[in-house]
């Protein structure tokens, strides 16, 4: 695994990953209905920290949307589940290719999954 991203204004150090994940909409600031199923599509987490992650997806999301996420940490044979909020959207890069980029922060995570994430980040060098 490559080293962390250079220091910037973020609260926690980010680490590059390539993790395919699933998610579903829980709450939308524009009133969209919650989704009943997790999206199985090609949703990719490309970096992660203690406080959040960066997501590339074919699904459009509004800033301030809350989503349920599920992603594997194979080193620990765990499927992490959490809730996260879209805090940043980049709709400039790939919308013509049907891809969107989002910065998300974790809202809630079971203590067990938090512990697994902390172990994973230590292994990554954090």
Image (tube, helix red, strand yellow):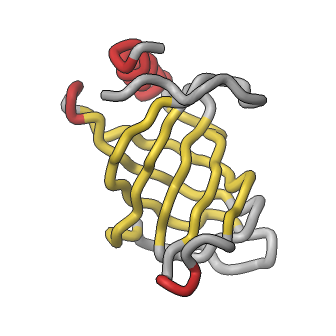
Q: Quadrant of residue 105?
A: top right
Residue depicted at x 49% and y 62%: 56
Q: Nearer the viewer, residue 115 or 86?
A: 86
Q: Quadrant of residue 77?
A: top left
Left or right for 74, reference 37: left
Q: Is residue 64 above or below residue 115?
A: below
Residue 117 makes an appearance in the image = yes
Residue 29 picture location, percent across and down: 80, 69
Of the pair 98 and 107, the residue shown nearer to us = 98
Q: Position of residue 85 (x, y in %)?
A: 68, 51
Q: Residue furthest bottom?
A: 96
The picture places residue 99, in percent across and down from the top left corner, at 50, 75
* 27 lies left or right of 34: right
Residue 112 makes an appearance in the image? no
In the image, residue 46 sits, relative to residue 78, either above or below, namely: below
In the orientation shown, which residue stands out farthest toward the front? 6
């Amino acid at each position: 695994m490559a080293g962390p991203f250079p220091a910037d204004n973020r609260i926690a150090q980010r680490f590059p990953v390539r993790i395919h994940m699933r998610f579903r909409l829980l709450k939308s600031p524009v009133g969209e209905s919650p989704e009943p199923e997790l999206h199985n599509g090609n949703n990719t987490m490309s970096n992660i920290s203690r406080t959040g992650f960066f997501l590339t997806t074919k699904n459009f999301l509004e800033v301030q949307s809350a989503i349920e996420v599920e992603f594997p940490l194979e080193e620990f044979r765990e499927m992490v589940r959490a809730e996260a909020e879209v805090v940043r959207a980049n709709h400039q890069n790939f919308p013509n290719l049907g891809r969107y980029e989002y910065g998300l922060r974790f809202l809630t995570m079971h203590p067990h999954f938090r512990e697994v994430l902390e172990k994973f980040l230590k292994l990554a060098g954090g």
